[in-house]
Amino acid sequence: MAQGQATKIKKKKKSVLKRAAQSHQRAGVNRANRTQVRTFMKRMRTAIGAGDPTAVGNLLHPTMAAIDRAITKGVLHENTGNRYKSRLTLAYNGLKAKAAK
C-alpha cells in the first residue's frame, strides 16, 4: 500500500470499522515517531559533517532519547535502533578526538 492512502474497508461491521480507525490512528502516531527520529539523525549528521563537536554534543542526548522512545513504542526494532546509536556515538567520538588534537 502506498503511503498516505486509506485502507479499503470491505465490511461495515462495527468491530471492523473500529479496528480500521485504530489502525489509522496508530499509523499516524508511528509516522510521527519515525519522522522525529529521522529529523534528529539528519540534524546530527549535518553537524558531524560540519565538524562542530559542541553542536553534535548538544544533539547527542535528544537523538538517543528519540531513538530509545521509538524502540520502546515499537516503531524501530531494537537492533536497528542500537545500530543507529552506535554509529552516531562513534562519529561523535571521532569528531571529539579530532578536535582535541
Image: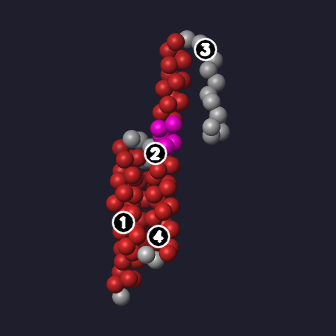
Numbered badge on residue 11:
3
- At numbered mark 1, what does the secondary structure look like: helix, strand or loop? helix
The crowding category of the residue bearing disc 3, from other C-alpha atoms within 10 Å (few below 14, some 14 to 19, many at least 20), is few
Look at mark 2 in the image and give the residue it sits on: 33
- The residue at the point 40 percent across, 70 percent down is 55
**Which-is-in-front pick, marks 4 and 3?**
4
User: Viewer-proximal residue, 71 or 57?
Assistant: 57
- The main secondary structure of the magenta stretch is helix
- The residue at the point 53 percent across, 17 percent down is 16
Asked if labels 3 and 4 touch by Cβ distance under 8 angstroms, the answer is: no
**Which-is-in-front pick, marks 3 and 1?**
1
Vertical side of 59 occupied by 18: above or below: above
Give, as a three-letter code, the residue at label 1.
Answer: Asn
Q: CA distance from mark 2 to mark 3?
A: 30 Å
Q: Quadrant of residue 6?
A: top right
Which badge, 2 or 4, is on the more N-terminal residue?
Answer: 2
- At numbered mark 4, what does the secondary structure look like: helix, strand or loop? helix
Q: Quadrant of residue 96?
A: bottom left
Q: Magenta stretch?
A: 28-33
Look at mark 4 in the image and give the residue it sits on: 47
Asked if labels 4 and 1 touch by Cβ distance under 8 angstroms, the answer is: no
Q: CA distance from mark 4 to mark 3?
A: 50 Å
Numbered badge on residue 58:
1
The crowding category of the residue bearing disc 1, from other C-alpha atoms within 10 Å (few below 14, some 14 to 19, many at least 20), is few
Q: CA distance from mark 3 to mark 1?
A: 51 Å
Give, as a three-letter code, the residue at label 3.
Answer: Lys
- At numbered mark 2, what does the secondary structure look like: helix, strand or loop? helix
Asked if labels 4 and 2 touch by Cβ distance under 8 angstroms, the answer is: no
Asked if labels 3 and 2 touch by Cβ distance under 8 angstroms, the answer is: no
Give, as a three-letter code, the residue at label 4.
Answer: Ala
- The residue at the point 40 percent across, 52 percent down is 67
Q: CA distance from mark 2 to mark 4?
A: 21 Å
